[in-house]
Image (cartoon, grey):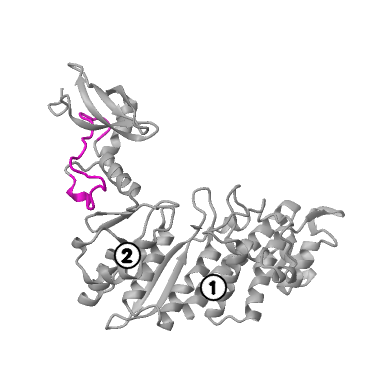
Amino acid sequence: MSLEMVPGAKCYVPDEKDVWLPAEVIGQKSGTKEITCKVWLVDGSTEERVVDLDDKKTRAMMSGKGESSDNVETLPFQNENVGDEGIEDMITLNYLHEAAILYNVKTRFLKELPYTYTGDICIAVNPYKRLHDLYAEEQHIRYLNFPREELPPHVYATSVASYENMKTAGRNQSILVSGESGAGKTETTKILMNHLATIAGGMNDGTIKKIIEVSPLLEYFGNAKTVRNDNSSRFGKFTQLQFDRVGTLVGAKCKTYLLEKTRVISHEHPERNYHIFYQVIDSGDIAKDLFLDPAANYRYIGEKSTAMIEGQSDAQHFNITADRLSLIGFDHNAQMDLYKTLAGILHLGNIAIISNPANDEESMITPGDTAASHAIALMGLTPESLQKALCSRTMRARNDVYSVPLKKELAMDCVDALSKAIYSRVFDWLVNLINAS
């Protein structure tokens, strides 16, 4: 019997549904690792359980406390004096293991305290609602002027530390924002950028205002609704903020990578394609000019979702898109060229390909296909060039170049490949445009 597992000891027991539950040791069967505990359930009730530390299933759940699954001798112990709001910096916990971390973070989350420190690391739990007081204007200066130890945990402390180190040491600084889907990485990045912009020049500065306000463009073109997150980034992003020697924010540059191209052509219900497609469909009179009908069915869209994204409709988000494009010098005519390309992709997805009646080894666009006509008109193509691009491939052999017809199935794959390639080019072009502005 472990000397620590004595009756009355406060601990946590593993649970299949709730992961860990608080408990109190009642006793341990002599010569075994069977520990009897009084367990407090989530609903407030209690029950008695026997936890066998020799059980393979129990050892598998216990391995998260940092021990080998073959060497579990005790249950993880509870920390004392955690308080109603938990511990602000978890390196001060007497027992630091998975259960203690999860319970401390949960305690703070329930008190609407989403930030917790672990040394220099700031852990953020997505509150799934706006906590306006946490980001009030006075908070920007407060975290700049007061020592970190005198203030509650906040992501502002991270941005201030980077900013001060940059000015003091004269070296580049990096902030890494990581987490699973829906954790709040996109929002946290925006919060950090907004804070840095505020303390490094003020939001009234034209350059700084542009840096902050154009950020939604990348979200509209690179984010989509998933099962776990209504505004999930489907690409990687490295944002570089540029400062002068006195610490004033003077510019920004963004590098992107690994755009999820397959989402352009397919996604699972109830997920969505990229936000911008729904915005263009719901753009009112502009949609009519693009031959788009909100009531129509588009293969790349599937069942059209009417879900509000961040509390606004797709039509409202489209107005923001147009405003932000204007901010970086994109006038109405230039915007229409962009919208035509996006609409053209949707029409490409609806093109019907059939086998050539005269030769099953060849394919062709269905004569009189409306979607093809719309794609041709919007993208500045000719019927012949579209037919050649979709229903044949170009082969090279030494000095010869010749065209090989494609079967219907391969031609449909070609449609999807072309759509993905066009959207990827549009996305890369937009990133370059934003950087140049």
Where residue 106 is drawn, which disc sits there?
A: none
- Left or right: where does residue 25 sit relative to residue 315? left
Q: Position of residue 433 (x, y in %)?
A: 52, 77
Between 192 and 83, the one lying in front of the other is 83
Q: CA distance from mark 2 to mark 1?
A: 24 Å
Magenta stretch: includes residue 101: no
Residue closest to the far right:
358
Q: Circle 1 sits on which residue?
A: 430
Q: Position of residue 174 (x, y in %)?
A: 31, 67
Residue type (three-letter) at the residue carrying disc 1: Leu
- Secondary structure beneath disc 1? helix
Residue closest to the far top:
30
| Span colored in magenta | 68-93
Please tell me whether residue 206 is drawn above or below residue 348 in the rendered image.
Answer: below
Image quadrant where residue 64 sits? top left
Answer whether residue 94 is visible to the viewer in this image.
yes
Magenta stretch: includes residue 88: yes
Q: Residue at x 69, y 69 (%)?
A: 400
Where residue 175 is drawn, which disc sits there?
A: 2
Q: Position of residue 374 (x, y in %)?
A: 76, 67
Q: Residue at x 60, y 57 (%)?
A: 273
Image quadrant where residue 199 sits? bottom left
Other-residue count near label 2 (Cα within 10 Å), few / some / many at <14 / 14–19 / ≥20 = few
- Left or right: where does residue 131 sit relative to residue 409? left
Other-residue count near label 1 (Cα within 10 Å), few / some / many at <14 / 14–19 / ≥20 = some
Give the total of numbered labels: 2
Residue type (three-letter) at the residue carrying disc 2: Ile
- Secondary structure beneath disc 2? loop
Residue closest to the far left:
3
Along the polypeptide, which appears first: circle 2 or circle 1? 2
Answer whether residue 392 is visible to the viewer in this image.
no
Q: Residue at x 56, y 61 (%)?
A: 312
